[in-house]
Amino acid sequence: MAVNVPGLVAVIVFYVLILALGLWAARKNKGETKSENIMLAGRNINLFVGMFTMTATWVGGGFINGTAEYVYTLGLVWCQAPLGYAVSLVLGGVFFAQRMRSQGHVTMLDPYSRKFGNKMGGILYIPSLLGEVFWSGAILSALGSTLAVILDIDQTLSIIISACIAVLYTLFGGLYSVAYTDVLQLTCMFVGLWLSIPFAMTNEHVTSITTNSSTVWIKELEPKYVGYYMDSFMLLILGGIPWQAYFQRVLSANSAFNAKMLSITAGLGCVIMSVPSVLIGAVAANTDWNATTYATVDKKPVPIPSDQASNILPLVMQYLTPTWVSFIGLGAVAAAVMSSTDSSILSASSMFARNIYKMIFRPKASEREIMWAMRISIFFIGALATFIAIVVESVYVLWFLCSDLLYVISFPQLLCVVYLRDTNTYGSVVGFVVGVVLRLTGGEYTLHITPVIKYPWYSESEGLQLFPYKTFAMLVTFTSIVAVSSLTTYVFGRGLLPSKFDIFKCFEGKSECSVELHVSSSSTKYNDNPAYAHSQNQLHGRYQSTREIPEK
């Protein structure tokens, strides 16, 4: 197949626009000397931009391509991501966003470091880092395979160029560049996807999607899979909250109220942006591919091979819409990928610079040094994600496993630091170990890891855990944190064990569990807010003697 010149031009034009906008937005950081302002755009993101950047972060290449793929292959019933992520954003906004923003944290790891100590915060960085890197690698890999199939260009080259552009404007502009390019990227996605729908649905080789819809593209859920289904759904909802990419946008909002609202409205945005992908998947399921140029001219196999099903959305654009429509549609696919890649790279780099480099290795580092640490980590994390996208075949599966770890490990820890006053480092350590052990011993059929623990209803023929074991592991992790924290508080508080056995120093005035963490207010208008000033006084006063703050 010859190179698809119109599609290639569309991608090049889009990349030039994104790079130009990203570098223009970077001017807002010209002369900036505070690393926090680079990470959080000076906490000056308004509701409009915040809603766009939050939605664009979730509605990435994996979201729109995966939604169309699942509708085409397994049916709408099994397409859980749109509703799952939407509910996740709403719950995150209602229960976490306003609290985290009002306390003035800079990264998601700040409350972990404050309550459990810097070293434990560093350990909890590991699953977050792996999740962000593998996610970036997965969507870069998806983009590379898409461009290779649709444009007939080298996959490795397309991955490298895409990653370089995302790293370049993120390197210079921080969250300002990421947020403003997200506005353009989401707009391109919206226009490109919706523009394709009427042309694809009215193509002569496509039957009405209402014909036998319940059996062709909606399908049904077999009763035996209910436990597995609900487990996956809960993973999307609760496991979608403890991500730095999410909290970076929450913490950059210009008020605590807007932090909550941008999360809730982004949930609605996810639902809206999923509709065209669902329709494209339905169109693909109702297409006679043998009659299209996909088979008659390009001589490609029908039915579409399972390893190409992830490209069903760009295939519909290429073969079922006019050239000029596919021109815009392929730009939408590229937009989706870029909007998630830059977010993940910046998120992982921000946590490293602040919570690892500064808090563990260089407590007295200057702001300039922290900014350089973040920029260097942006480069290396981007390079690592690119390398993984090129050499690892099952990047998406690795990311999925990391998402499991975030659900099982990070969500219970987040719940404890935000809502429970009496948890401590002992509980956090035990919960971490318990969560890792339970998740790994549960196996993973997509990685061909045989489970050590076979829960009720285990399917030997499919090698599948039908019991909701991930949710079970998450609940056991949470219970372990609370139980061990309560036990150690009782034992040391009653003097049943001498203080020399308090290895984490959780029950002394100054301790490993008690961290002097600078929580800043980057805008004077928040200092003028009595409620905000009161919360800051609580924070700074409480840090002097204990590891926790009063619950608001």
Image: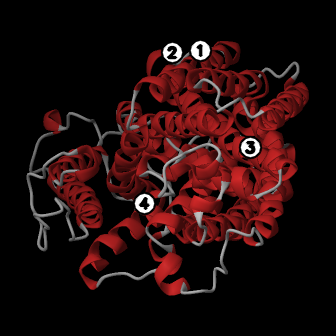
What residue sits right under mark 3 in the picture? 335
Using residue 367 as the reference point, say whether residue 397 is left or right of it.
Answer: left
Distance from the alpha carbon under mark 2 to that under mark 1: 5 Å
* Quadrant in which the C terminus is drawn: bottom right
Q: Earlier in the sequence, mark 1 or mark 3?
A: 3
Distance from the alpha carbon under mark 2 to that under mark 4: 29 Å
Q: Amino acid at mark 3?
A: Ala
**Label 1 residue SS:** loop
What residue sits right under mark 4 in the picture? 415
Q: Nearer the viewer, residue 451 or 301?
A: 301
- Which one is closest to the eye, mark 3 or mark 2? 3
What residue sits right under mark 2 in the picture? 362
Q: Amino acid at mark 2?
A: Arg
What residue sits right under mark 1 in the picture? 365
Residue 367 higher or lower than 232, as above or below: above
Residue 116 higher or lower than 280, as above or below: above
- Which one is closest to the eye, mark 1 or mark 3? 3
Q: Amino acid at mark 1?
A: Ala
Q: Earlier in the sequence, mark 1 or mark 4?
A: 1
Distance from the alpha carbon under mark 1 to that under mark 3: 37 Å
**Label 3 residue SS:** helix
Residue 145 higher or lower than 54, as above or below: above
